[in-house]
Image (tube, helix red, strand yellow):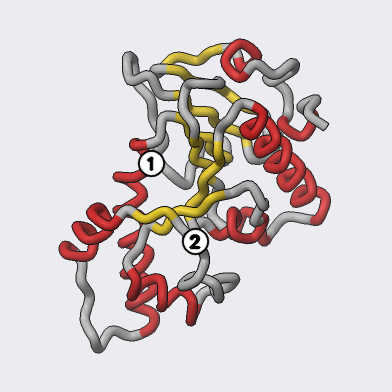
């Protein structure tokens, strides 16, 4: 992995799949994410997450760098109405202004929108921006529900992209390189990398 790229995108399921879990499960996910951050640091890769990812914000690992996929008006709305978003206007974040501006231009909303309609519009903006931003990352670690993913994360033959699908229930990774399943130990270079991230020998 070292030298493949210097950044990786980390994705999580919808917040309902955190909120409904018990303390033991949450501890397992947090430990797995911390192990992943330790691993990425060891190979010179910085982990990035979307500020709009509720689970990422909840866990909030110190190693995470943040991506803002929405415009300033949407961000201000989030800081006012969304949980754990009080720092939305002040937290340092990587911006994608050209992508965001194109999304807003196609779905500008109106000044007399209700709060509920504004929530729906912000969600549309996020979804459309992420569909463009995610493919730009060569390395993506996707904590995903079995047979049901929060995001479209793909790789195909010849694209030289690494996609690591991490089973949200077991934190066991499946590694894809250019569209093909590869051995996790070979690609990630971690002993027992095909086991749960919680048990990776990184401490």
| Crowdedness near tag 1: few (<14), some (14–19) or many (≥20) residues, C-alpha within 10 Å | some
Residue 164 % position (x, y): 54, 28
Q: Is residue 194 left or right of residue 93?
A: right
- The residue that label 1 is drawn on is 134
Residue 113 % position (x, y): 28, 84
- The residue that label 2 is drawn on is 92
Marks 1 and 2: in contact by CB < 8 Å?
no
* Whether residue 133 is visible: yes
The part of the image, by quadrant, that contains residue 33 is top right
Q: Quadrant of the C terminus?
A: top right
| Crowdedness near tag 2: few (<14), some (14–19) or many (≥20) residues, C-alpha within 10 Å | few
Q: Is residue 88 left or right of residue 178?
A: right
Q: Is residue 199 left or right of residue 179?
A: right
* Residue visible at 59% across and 49% down in the picture: 64
* Residue visible at 73% across and 23% down in the picture: 195
19 to 84, vertically: above or below: above
Question: Viewer-proximal residue, 127 or 37?
Answer: 37
Q: Secondary structure at mark 2?
A: loop
* Residue visible at 56% across and 33% down in the picture: 45
Residue 81 % position (x, y): 49, 80
Residue 23 % position (x, y): 81, 55
Q: Check residue 40 in the rendering and tell me which mark sits there, or answer none.
A: none
Q: Secondary structure at mark 1?
A: helix
Query: For the residues carrying marks 2 and 1, which lies nearer the camera in this image?
Result: 2
Residue extending furthest left? 106
* Whether residue 144 is visible: no
Disc 2 versus disc 1: distance between alpha carbons?
19 Å
Between discs 2 and 1, the one toward the N terminus: 2
156 to 101, vertically: above or below: above
């Amino acid at each position: 992995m070292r030298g493949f790229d210097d950044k990786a995108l980390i994705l999580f399921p919808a917040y309902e799949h955190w909120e409904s879990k018990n303390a033991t499960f949450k501890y397992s996910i947090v430990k797995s994410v911390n192990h992943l951050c330790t691993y990425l640091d060891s190979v010179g890769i910085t982990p990035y997450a979307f500020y709009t990812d509720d689970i990422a914000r909840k866990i909030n690992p110190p190693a995470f760098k943040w991506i803002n996929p929405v415009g300033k008006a949407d961000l201000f709305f989030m800081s006012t109405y969304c949980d754990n978003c009080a720092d939305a206007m002040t937290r340092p974040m990587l911006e994608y202004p050209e992508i965001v501006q194109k999304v807003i231009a196609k779905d500008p909303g109106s000044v007399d929108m209700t709060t509920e309609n504004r929530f729906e519009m912000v969600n549309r903006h996020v979804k459309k921006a992420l569909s463009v931003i995610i493919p730009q990352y060569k390395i993506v670690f996707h904590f995903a529900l079995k047979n049901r993913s929060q995001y479209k994360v793909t790789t195909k033959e010849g694209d030289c992209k690494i996609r690591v699908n991490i089973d949200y229930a077991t934190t066991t990774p499946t590694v894809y390189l250019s569209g093909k399943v590869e051995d996790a130990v070979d690609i990630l270079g971690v002993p027992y990398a095909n086991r749960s991230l919680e048990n990776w020998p990184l401490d």
